[in-house]
Structure formats: structure tokens, C-alpha cells
Image (cartoon, rainbow, N blue to C red):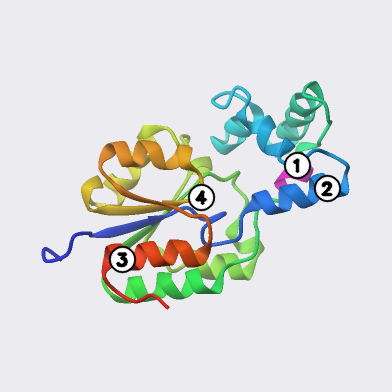
Amino acid sequence: MSDRSFDAVFWDFGGVVTTSPFEAFNSYEESHGIPKDFIRGVNTHNPDSNAWAQIERQEISAEVFNELFAAESEALGHKVPGADVLGCLYGNVRPEMVKALKTIHDSGYTQACLTNNVNRSVEERSDVSAAMTIFDHVIESSKVGIRKPEPGFYTLACDTAGVSPERVIFLDDLGINLKPARAMGMSTIKVVSADQALSELEGLLGMSLR
């Protein structure tokens, strides 16, 4: 594909291919009388070593995470069991994103899913499993032992996909995850909504995805 500007598209999963887990967090918070975005706030304290970081690198079990997150959140004002947080991770699969994945796949681009996860089997939900099968590569933090935004995660993804960062487009809903990718030379899209993201992706690829 020497006549193209890009060889690959890298996608975050939760919040990009699916609706954001943050929406589920907010619903949980509202139903439990907890301030909005409190759960996200817990995850920003000691972000490289807190319970969330440890489970995404698969350094602790779900049982240990349940206790650690409860302790961390309680120290910040509201006790939230870690098990409840894990139950909010997968939102609804966005059909327009799945269509875009298929169109890009059929056009010959390499596609990789770069996901921070907690080793939950994708087979738990058929819609999630079906979307995952479209990717050429799936890089999971729980399996490789590093996570976004650690630079090594992006280097591993590029090596796995056999592409150089300068020829990659990366979509994520978190700016903190896009920053190191952009520093490596990737073109990045911060996903605010599916329509916005697809419009920007269409502009970069020069093709219709809808």
C-alpha cells in the first residue's frame, strides 16, 4: 500500500467500538448516591500502581482487586467494591463502528485492538466476541503485562502488526492514551462520539465508512 498514507488502524475497544464504560460508571454512581465521575477519580490516584493499574497488568486477581479498590475508594470518601466496577466495563457495541471495521478490513488495512482489560473472556458476550474477530491483532494489557499509556505497549503493538508508527491511525477515548502514541508519530483521533470519530477517520483514510 505504498500509495497510501497509512498502513494500519489501531482501535481502543471500550469507549470506541463500544459505548463508554464511563456511562455505566455514572449510572452506578447515580443509583448509589455517589458523586458523578467518582470512580474515574479513584483511578487517577497513583495511576501506575493502584488497584486498577495492577489488574490491567494482571498482577492481581479479581478477588484482590475487589478488596483493594474498595479500600482505595473508601479512603476517598465512598466505598465501592471492585467487583461492581468490573461489572460496568463493557458498554453496548456500536454497530456503526463494526461496519467501519469491516469496511477498513475489506480495503486491505491492518487493524489492531489495543485494549486495557482485566482478562475477562470476550466469549462472555457474543456481540463483543464477533467484533473482536474482525481485528487482525488483539493486544490485551492483561496478557502482555503492560498497559496504555506505557510507551512499550504501543511499541509492542506496532511490532506485532508489522507497521511503523508514522503509518498508523489510533483511536481512543482518553487523551492520556493518545499522547504517547502521537509522540511516536501516530495520527490520533480522540473519540467523543461515534459520528465525530468516523468523520475524522474518513478524512484521514479518504474513504467512506458509513
How far apart marks 4 and 3 lie (CA) works out to: 18 Å
Residue 173 makes an appearance in the image? yes
Task: Place residue 46 in its image quadrant.
Answer: top right
Mark seen at residue 30? 2
How far apart marks 1 and 3 lie (CA) works out to: 34 Å
**Who's the residue at 47% across and 41% down the image?**
175
For disc 4, the neighbor class at 10 Å (few under 14, some 14 to 19, many from 20) is many
Looking at marks 3 and 2 on the same chain, the residue that comes earlier in the sequence is marked by 2
**Who's the residue at 61% across and 35% down the image?**
55
Q: Position of residue 152 (x, y in %)?
A: 36, 34
Mark seen at residue 36? 1
How far apart marks 3 and 2 lie (CA) works out to: 38 Å
Which span is picked out in magenta?
83-87
Q: Are marks 2 and 1 in contact (CB under 8 Å)?
A: yes
Dominant secondary-structure state across the stretch colored magenta: helix
Q: Are marks 4 and 2 in contact (CB under 8 Å)?
A: no
In this rendering, would 68 be left or right of 59? Answer: right
The amino acid type of the residue labelled 1 equals: Lys
The amino acid type of the residue labelled 3 equals: Gly
